[in-house]
Image (cartoon, coloured by chain):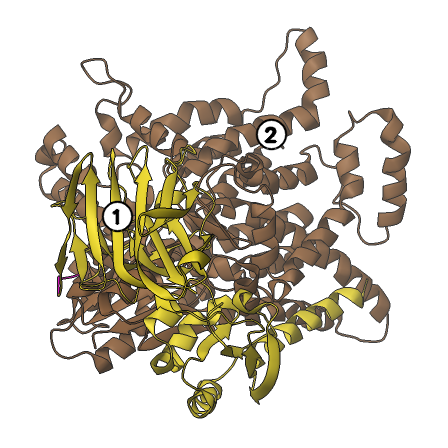
Chain colours: A brown, B yellow
């Protein structure tokens, strides 16, 4: 875990700042100043005026991660000077969450099977998904909520064996997950569905006797979730449900923002999708095009090896399916047995852990603008199945090796390393163009361009042009920064990476240099430059594997 | 199974390396540039394929690609195209063209393509959109207000959703910034840039452009469309009103074309044979029932 965080820390240095990061820099700073005030003058900090002033900014998203970003900046950069580069101090909590996510996946895999190799392989393959690696650098919420999702589900899974402690932990973690990002609202659905499919029969028969054996996690979540959600988010302390004059309160505002979110634009298979109906294949297509094939293959193997266990868990399946179940079992038993009989319904739990985050994209009305990041919580479970697939494969390998080698563990380690290599290679090659990267199944970045897949979003690739601007621009030159936010531009200067005399401007005509981030629906900005300069000639094109990422126009 | 998955991992690794190895290098583009400079003749179109390589073509061959070439309405007027091609892809503008030569520069192949039936353009409306060749009018009822030709105006605006920008030289027709006749570039529904004459219709009236001494040929050929964000409609699927283009030669109608949202960069082709081989007054009128968000543009030539 710490190695992954160290790797993220080291490779974040020149990774450009995404649009949303710019917003969160500003919000986190505001929150951090409130925390500082809280330490100095608690009475003043807890007034509504102080709270509204500090927490109004970016109040459409919960505050946990932004608070951590801000506290990291306040203490590690501003007060204690432990991190010299300001942006890194904001980003560090996100990176730590990425590392924690890998550790939790390892732990989950190990606890599932009692085999380190399952957990290790799952963690490695999760960390080596190019998109996860990119997002894990950022002061954003997508990797943190992936980690929180695993954390809640892990606690709940442990609680299914009984025990008050894990149920209590589930409630606490769900509250923290809610405070991280709204994906958390799907956790209760998963818990209930899992309970119904694995213990629905028991529940029915018990309920006839007047018993209602629900998992203890559910009441804990109901009790603790909202308390933590509101308790850690000062913005929600006032007018939570309604304003004094009876209008909907702040929770309603938060919910409506996400329930009626703008659709934005996203290219997929050559078409710019901007309003529903969106293609139902989007999530699956993007998984195939962005997750290394070896991870998908091992994941499929992992699922197939657990079908016997799954059939056992779904005992309510019609008896007509029993022969099919045993046929599967007979065929697949060769590869791996499930872990010893457990009452937790672990395989269906893992499957739901993967499927529920993807559920919203069954609806053609769900926005697709986030690319893959919005279903990141599914990926740890894909990785866990890949770990199970590796377990099955390594057992076959061990059987094949027999007495031929003395250090079997070393041979298995080599096999694991060989299998991880393509994912490692793609992830290493993807940096710092994580959102432009496509797997060999798509034909790489050029194949993605041929297929008409989104090239990038958030305007973060401007950072890759900093050496060009630093070298080419006259003192005080202006740059039209297109999709990059002002906060993101300024952060490059505060970090000392971009020359401080270069000015961001908002129309090409005011600029000495004008950039265009290549996304299909942003082509119009290219044409605006053509009209402005009365020429289509570009001075520089930033490419990734030969694919245009950013064009630079220069005042003639 | 034991072999299959490690083999798949190996194949994935090799596929990645092969993709990276096939990426054209700077030196390949430079070599193609040298070849194009030597080979290109006046009137040749320089382009690249697939379409997504267009910024690279404008980077390396920028001095060989004019604004009119880059934002061409179609390729029918060109006799020959030199197309820097990678990955064996085709450019949609040159379907049916005959390849007469090809030269390789690493992964780049410069293909020489010949148009089997190039059009002979006698008079291009965009090229002549300036006084004294052209005049513009905003007509409301019986009032015909002549638009004023202005030059060297600062180009203002830009950014996502801002649409086409008003050019520095244009006929301004009112104090409204959008109410002008001028050569701009719109993003069409295929996201391609199209150079055309901005002619946003006015409510209850007509926007008219006249070329008093147009050299008329057998046909008036052109396209019309709206800027992408205006034509695609809003998030609820609401679209705008149809826009009608009406062409008159010496006051006599030669054709009209109705543009409906979603039709994209729509071609029109009117018979003007009876006026051919002489100079005549050509007038294009644009009207609509509801002028809201009608970021409309047209282009045409007499051929």
Mark nearest the camera among 2 and 1 is: 1
Quadrant in which residue B287 is drawn: top left
How many labels, in total?
2
For mark 1, what is the residue?
B208
Position of A388 compared to A141: left or right?
right
Find disc 2 in the rendering and name its residue. Answer: A162
- Subunit of label 2: A
Residue at 70 percent across and 57 percent down: it is A297
**Cα distance between the residues tagged 2 and 1:** 80 Å
State the quadrant of the C terminus of chain A: bottom left
For residue A547: magenta?
Answer: no
In the structure shown, which secondary structural element does the residue marked by tag 1 occupy? strand
What's the magenta bit mostly, secondary-structure-wise? loop
| Residue range (magenta) | B152-156
Q: Residues within 10 Å of mark 1 (few under 14, many from 20)?
A: many
Query: Closer to the camera, A190 or A170?
Result: A190
Vertically, is B31 above or below A474? Answer: below
Residue A202 drawn above or below residue A267: above
Q: Residue at x 56, y 46 (%)?
A: A283
The residue sitting at 21% across, 52% down in the picture is: B136
């Amino acid at each position: 875990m710490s190695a992954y965080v160290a790797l993220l820390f080291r490779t974040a240095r020149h990774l450009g700042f995404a649009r949303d990061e710019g917003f969160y820099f500003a919000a986190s700073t505001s929150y951090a100043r409130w925390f500082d005030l809280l330490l100095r003058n608690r009475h003043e900090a807890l007034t509504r005026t102080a709270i509204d002033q500090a927490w109004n900014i970016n109040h459409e998203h919960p505050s946990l991660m932004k608070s951590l970003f801000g506290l990291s900046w306040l203490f590690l950069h501003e007060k204690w000077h432990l991190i010299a580069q300001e942006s890194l101090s904001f980003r560090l909590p996100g990176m730590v969450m990425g590392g924690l996510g890998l550790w939790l996946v390892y732990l989950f895999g190990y606890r599932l099977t009692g085999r380190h190799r399952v957990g290790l392989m799952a963690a490695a393959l999760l960390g080596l998904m190019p998109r996860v690696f990119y997002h894990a650098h950022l002061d954003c919420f997508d990797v943190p909520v992936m980690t929180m999702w695993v954390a809640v589900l892990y606690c709940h899974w442990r609680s299914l064996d009984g025990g008050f402690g894990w149920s209590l932990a589930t409630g606490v973690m769900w509250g923290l997950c809610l405070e991280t990002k709204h994906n958390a609202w799907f956790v209760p659905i998963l818990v209930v569905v899992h309970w119904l499919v694995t213990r629905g029969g028991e529940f029915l028969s018990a309920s006839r006797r007047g018993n209602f054996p629900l998992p203890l996690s559910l009441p804990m979540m109901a009790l603790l979730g909202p308390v933590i959600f509101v308790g850690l988010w000062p913005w929600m302390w006032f007018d939570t449900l309604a304003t004094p004059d009876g209008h909907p309160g702040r929770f309603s505002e938060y919910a409506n923002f996400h329930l009626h979110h703008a659709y934005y634009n996203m290219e997929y298979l050559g078409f710019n999708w901007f309003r529903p109906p969106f293609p139902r294949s989007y999530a699956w297509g993007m998984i195939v095009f962005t997750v290394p094939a070896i991870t998908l293959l091992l994941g499929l193997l992992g699922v197939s090896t657990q079908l016997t266990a799954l059939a056992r868990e779904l005992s309510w399946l019609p008896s007509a399916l029993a022969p099919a179940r045993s046929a599967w079992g007979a065929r697949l038993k060769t590869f791996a047995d499930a872990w010893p009989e457990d009452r937790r319904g672990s395989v269906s739990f893992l499957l739901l852990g993967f499927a529920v985050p993807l559920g919203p994209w069954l609806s053609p009305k769900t926005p697709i603008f986030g690319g893959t990041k919005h279903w990141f919580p599914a990926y740890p479970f894909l990785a866990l199945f890949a770990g199970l697939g590796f377990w099955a494969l390594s057992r076959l390998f061990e059987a094949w090796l027999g007495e031929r080698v003395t250090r079997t563990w070393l041979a298995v380690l080599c096999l694991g390393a060989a299998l991880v290599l393509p994912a490692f290679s793609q992830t290493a090659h993807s940096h710092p163009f994580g959102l432009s990267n496509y797997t060999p199944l798509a034909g790489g970045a050029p194949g993605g361009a041929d297929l008409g897949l989104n090239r990038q979003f958030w305007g973060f690739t401007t950072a890759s042009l900093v050496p060009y601007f630093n070298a080419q621009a006259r003192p005080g030159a202006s740059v039209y920064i297109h999709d990059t936010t002002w906060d993101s531009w300024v952060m490059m200067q505060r970090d000392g990476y971009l020359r401080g005399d270069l000015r961001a401007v908002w129309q090409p005509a005011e600029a000495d240099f004008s950039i265009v981030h290549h996304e299909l629906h942003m082509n119009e900005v290219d044409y605006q430059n053509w009209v402005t300069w009365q020429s289509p000639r570009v001075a520089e094109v930033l490419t990734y594997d030969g694919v245009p990422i950013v064009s630079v126009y220069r005042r003639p | 199974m034991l072999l299959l998955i490690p083999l798949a991992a190996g194949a994935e690794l090799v596929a990645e390396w092969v993709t990276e190895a096939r990426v054209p290098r700077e030196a390949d583009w430079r070599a193609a540039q040298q070849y194009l400079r030597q080979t290109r003749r006046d009137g040749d179109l320089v382009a690249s394929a697939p379409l997504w390589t267009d910024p690279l073509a404008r980077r390396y061959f920028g001095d060989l690609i004019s604004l009119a070439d880059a934002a061409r309405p179609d390729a029918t007027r060109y006799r020959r195209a030199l197309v820097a091609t990678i990955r064996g892809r085709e450019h949609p503008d040159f379907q049916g063209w005959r390849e007469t030569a090809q030269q390789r520069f690493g992964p780049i192949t410069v293909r020489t393509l010949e148009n089997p039936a190039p059009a002979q353009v006698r008079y291009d409306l965009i090229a002549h959109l300036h006084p004294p060749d052209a005049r513009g009018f905003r007509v409301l009822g019986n009032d015909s207000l002549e638009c004023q030709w202005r030059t060297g105006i600062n180009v203002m605006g830009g950014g996502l959703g801002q649409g086409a920008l008003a050019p520095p030289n244009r006929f301004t027709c009112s104090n409204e910034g959008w109410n002008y006749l001028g050569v701009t570039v719109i993003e069409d529904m295929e996201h391609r840039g199209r150079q055309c004459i901005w002619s946003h219709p006015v409510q209850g009236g007509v926007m008219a452009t006249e070329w008093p001494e147009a050299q008329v040929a057998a046909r008036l050929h052109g396209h019309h469309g709206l800027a992408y964000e205006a034509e695609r409609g809003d998030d609820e699927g609401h679209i705008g009103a149809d826009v009608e283009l009406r062409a008159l030669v010496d006051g006599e109608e030669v054709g009209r074309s109705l543009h409906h949202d979603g039709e994209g960069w729509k071609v029109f082709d009117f018979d003007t044979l009876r006026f051919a081989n002489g100079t005549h007054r050509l007038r294009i009128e644009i009207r609509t029932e509801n002028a809201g968000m009608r970021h409309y543009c047209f282009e045409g030539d007499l051929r």
